[in-house]
Amino acid sequence: MAHLLFTDGGARGNPGIGGAGAILSDAQGIILGKASQKLGICTNNQAEYMALILGLNLAIKNKISELTVFMDSNLVVEQVSGNFKVKNADLKKLFLDVQKLILKFKKISFKHIPRAKNKLADKLANEAMDAQM
């Protein structure tokens, strides 16, 4: 049975103070874990990748083998799905980190969702940003 992962990252300013959030749940929506991280100064796209890495590590820690990841960053979803190339050097390193983590799952997929459907992960990312101000 696939589990669900919602991730969000942001930066106040671009670049600016960044934060990441991740929510892991079962298929019924029962929350199994949450994580947030202060990121220091980064871009919005870097924060989105770092939130994804945070969430994937949370899923690995919980021994999840099948995962559907939901993000409101269409760019990151398209890049990790192989539809867009990663041209930015800073993002390339993060992209490669994600690719290594993906190998630890039996089945994984990435889906873009509107920001309004990603409120819990967004809240955790904002709390991480607030903690740095």
Image (tube, grey):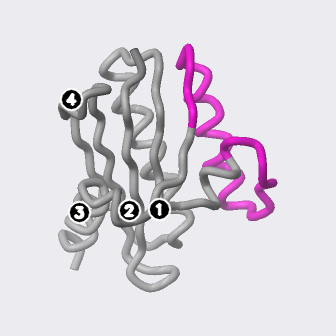
Q: Which of marks 4 and 3 is nearer the N terminus?
A: 4
Q: Earlier in the sequence, mark 2 or mark 1?
A: 2
**Kind of residue indicated by mark 2:** Leu
Quadrant position of residue 111: top right
Q: What residue is rendered at 24% in x and 34% in y?
A: 29
**Kind of residue indicated by mark 3:** Lys
Give the Cα separation between the discs numbered 4 and 2. 23 Å
Q: Earlier in the sequence, mark 4 or mark 1?
A: 4
Whole-percent x and y of residue 42? 49, 70
Give the Cα separation between the discs numbered 2 and 1. 7 Å
Give the Cα separation between the discs numbered 2 and 3. 15 Å
**Kind of residue indicated by mark 1:** Ala
Residue 39, numbered circle: 2
Of badges 4 and 1, the one in the foreground is 4
Question: Vertical placement of 104 versus 44: above or below?
Answer: above
Segment tinted magenta in the rendering: 80-109
Of badges 2 and 3, the one in the foreground is 3
Q: Mark 3 points at which residue?
A: 123
Whole-percent x and y of residue 103? 61, 21
Q: What element carries label 1?
A: helix
Residue 32, numbered circle: 4
Question: Vertical placement of 88 versus 102: above or below?
Answer: below
Whole-percent x and y of residue 33? 22, 34
**Residue 88: in magenta span:** yes
**Kind of residue indicated by mark 4:** Leu
Of badges 3 and 1, the one in the foreground is 3
Whether pointer 2 and pointer 1 mark residues with C-beta atoms closer than 8 Å, the reply is yes
Q: Nearer the viewer, residue 96 or 25?
A: 25
Q: Earlier in the sequence, mark 2 or mark 3?
A: 2
